[in-house]
Image (cartoon, rainbow, N blue to C red):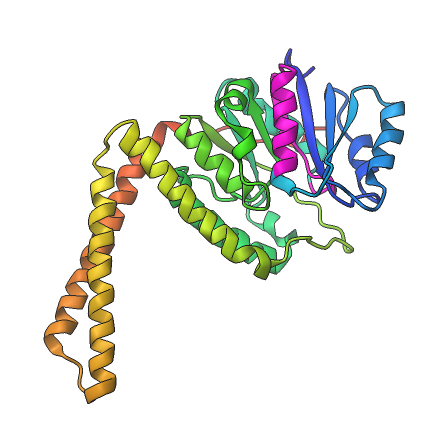
Amino acid sequence: MYRDNLIAVVVPCFNERERIGNVIETMPEFVDRIYVVDDCSTDGSGDVVKEHAERRPGVYLIPHAKNRGVGAAISTGYMICREENVDIAVVMAGDGQMDPADLPDVLDPVVDGEADYVKGNRFFGGPGGDAIPRVRLFGNLVLSALTKVVSGYWHVSDTQCGYTAINRDALESIDWANVYPRYGCPNDILTRLNVAHMRVAEVKVQSRYGSDWTSKMKVRKVMMPILHLMWRLFLHRMYWKYIYMSGHPLIFYYAAAAAMMTVSAILFVYILARLLWTGVIPQAALIMFGVAFGVVIQLLLGAFELDFQANRALCVELRRITKRHG
């Protein structure tokens, strides 16, 4: 128990035989249950978990019959936590990235009732992100920027960090069976939490990447699926939050921006075709393009501002300074 709360840690695991044992061994004593979701590992990771389960009460191996992805593993763990009436569920990776010393800081805002969902942020304090591999860092920054627009949580700046804590209300508000099963799951979860009107906060955490650490994520393989997912999530949130639930004027801003963007694209193609065909840029069309594009920018900025204001109460800015425990 942690401050009278039943705590469970969900550990998604895929081929982490060399690391999963240390993750379990270093888990703080106040963690009541550890659900290791083995996503059909082929290296015997499950056997290591079974060995530790014999020595430490509260360790459970949850095997997937086939590889479904990290998002599916997290969702499986969350559904078990919901069924077992866990007060707070935490996610910590099976490769040991998450420092257990940060766990109290991740839990405290949820325990104190300040937030329904807390994400770790590896960039608070500046140099914390230096340990992250550069390719992964670049992808993280791009996805974090896009996710601000998609999810409505404009204050979240490390959307891909998997170190999280979620309370029971938020657990019960999401249909976990439909969450994106692979690497886009953090973006999907944030968007669904926003539609469910859940408060989200970030706290500083440390990243632990060893010299032999390698990412299982293949950037070229996941880039297009995640971009497609982001577009679907944006439309999902716009419909459910601003059309179905409220009829918010934000929708008119985005609709007008889309219309003017179409006009801008048509004008751009026309100008380019005339330039290639005649060698002359049509001045009238160029002026119209400039005006249309300027209107698009203004409409988008207006939409962003309206969305920011509509979600201000859900974007929890913690004012206390987090500290290292232990």
Q: Position of residue 3 (x, y in %)?
A: 64, 14
- The quarter in which the N terminus is drawn is top right
At x 81% / y 46%, what residue is drawn? 42
- At x 78%, y 25%, the residue is 60
Q: Work out whether residue 200 or residue 84 is closer to the camera in this orientation and state it.
A: 84
20 sits to left or right of 174: right
Kindly identify the residue that appears in the image at 63 percent across and 57 percent down. Answer: 218
Q: Residue furthest front?
A: 65
One can see residue 293 in this view: no
Number of labelled discs? 0
146 and 81: which is toward the camera: 81
- Quarter of the rendering containing residue 199: top left
Q: Position of residue 308 (x, y in %)?
A: 32, 37
Give the residues drawn in magenta, as a range. 72-97
The answer to if 83 sits in the magenta stretch is yes
In-front residue for pair 320/275: 275
Left or right? Give the position of 216 relative to 252. Answer: right
The answer to whether residue 253 is seen in the rendering is yes
In this picture, residue 243 sits left or right of residue 65: left
Name the spot of residue 224 as percent of width and height, x first: 50, 57
> Residue 118 occupies which quadrant of the picture?
top right
247 over 13 or under it: above or below? above
